[in-house]
Amino acid sequence: MGSWKELESRIKKGQTIVKVELALINTERRRWREVLTRFVAIIHSLPERNVPLRGSTDTLYQPNNRNFLKEVELMAQFDPVLKEHIAKVQGGASHTSYLGNITQNELIDCISERVLECMVTEIRQSKYFSIILDCTPDLSHKEQLSVIIRIVAAEGTAQIKEYFMGFLEAEQTTREGLSTLILKKLKELNIPFEDCRGQSYDNGVRASTADPAIKIEAQALAEEVGSYRFSICTVVWYDILGKVQTVNKLLQSQCMHLDVAVDILKKAETSLVSYRDTGFADAQTSAKEVCEEMNVEAALKQKRLRTTKRQFSYEASDEPITDALKKMEFSFFNVVVDVAIESLRERTGMMSDVAKKFSVLINFPDLPASELEKQAKGLCNTLTSGDLADLNYDELIVEMQSFPKQWPKQNMTTLDLLVFLEEKGLKEIYLKNCCHYT
């Protein structure tokens, strides 16, 4: 009992060996925490400037040890923590330096996991999201699928955010293969695909084929590169894709309005319709200039073309075409432009339908009671699948009818509306449905 009481007294006074050793351990832990904090800061800094970390050696004060170790050497001149750490490493007092590439990779993995965790948390809080996918081959010719998720962050001031979730190696670039890959990734991140409200794909699907006919056609096309025919095709595709690319860039803007998007698509369609009348003649002029620069004869040679399925009325068999340019205009130019126009027309119709269904979220202060109820009910039905509903009709009507009359609705988007609720401190009142408006 006497020994136990003496130990109790020494513990209270901090005089035990265990207490001293624990203090030493805590001191060493704090030192390593400070060292690793600086290493993490360097690893954060270098990639932001697109600067590589490592060289051909992991040894300090060597000319080819590259940027990570050079940053450590520089900071050690002014920072006492790193100065002490390097002194211990060079003096042989510590067998552990945490300066090697293995530690760097572990720190990068830890940072990546933490960043991904924060992004996923915010995506779940925002609930609804859009997904943007793009396939591109790496240096080893393996398809890499980039995954970007776009959300409306409602915490604080509402804003649109895009998060790069990483690359996925796509073994199959078919629709089924890519769909399976992205669904598996979302499941791993515990992000429900049911909450996806928009999808965008770019160069997502590529064909590889063993069809002999297609191989022969590809070989024939390869032989034509540089010809007058090929130059005309190139100019036509350049003109069409240039118009489409401009539209795509505008539609991907974070601040794009639905009504503006519809107007852009209609103007693009009108532009292609006009191009159909004069584009082929203009393409011939441009192609001749290209041929002159390449010292190639600007003339089409008659060739036997593979029979293709007729898609339009003007391709009827009882309308023989003998002129090579006319045949190219009818069988190539008109077909390509018509398909582009039809695609834009279809997309315009879909976008117009979406804009019409969601217009109630902006126009509700000016709608009569009966029309407001009708449009609100239509929107709620659109956003309902089985037993799952994004909006509650009764609550939505009450919120719209009680919305402040002084809000500056002129030229206001749904995102502006969400910001307005935040600035006026009204988001709590409309908490149930405000996050669905965007």
Image: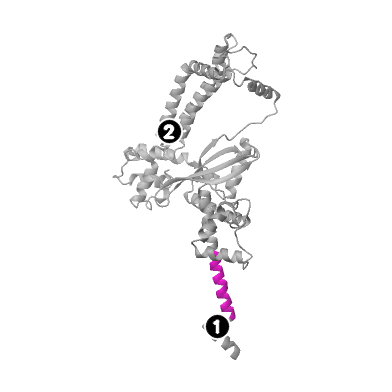
**Which SS class for mark 1?**
loop
Looking at the picture, how far across and down is residue 257, in whole percent? Answer: 40, 37
**Distance of mark 2 from mark 1, alpha carbons?**
75 Å
Residue that mark 2 sits on: 261
Is label 2 or label 1 in front? 1
At label 1, counting other C-alpha atoms closer than 10 Å, the crowd grade (few under 14, some 14-19, many 20 or more) is few
Looking at the picture, how far across and down is residue 227, in whole percent? Answer: 59, 18
In the rendered image, which quarter contains the C terminus? Answer: top left
Q: Is residue 224 above or below residue 420?
A: above
Q: Amino acid at mark 1?
A: Gln
Q: Is residue 147 above or below residue 225?
A: below
Q: Is residue 50 above or below residue 200?
A: below
Depth check: 329 or 28 in front? 28
Is 32 one of the magenta-colored residues?
A: yes
Looking at the picture, how far across and down is residue 50, in whole percent? Answer: 53, 46
Residue 56, can we see it?
yes
Q: Is residue 345 above or below residue 155?
A: above
Which residues make up the magenta segment?
A: 17-34
Identify the residue at the far bottom of this view. 2
Q: Amino acid at mark 2?
A: Ala
| Image quadrant where residue 311 sits | top right
Total numbered circles? 2
Residue that mark 1 sits on: 15
Is 292 one of the magenta-colored residues?
A: no
* Drawn side of residue 298 relative to residue 266, left or right: right
Residue 113, can we see it?
no
Looking at the picture, how far across and down is residue 175, in whole percent? Answer: 61, 36
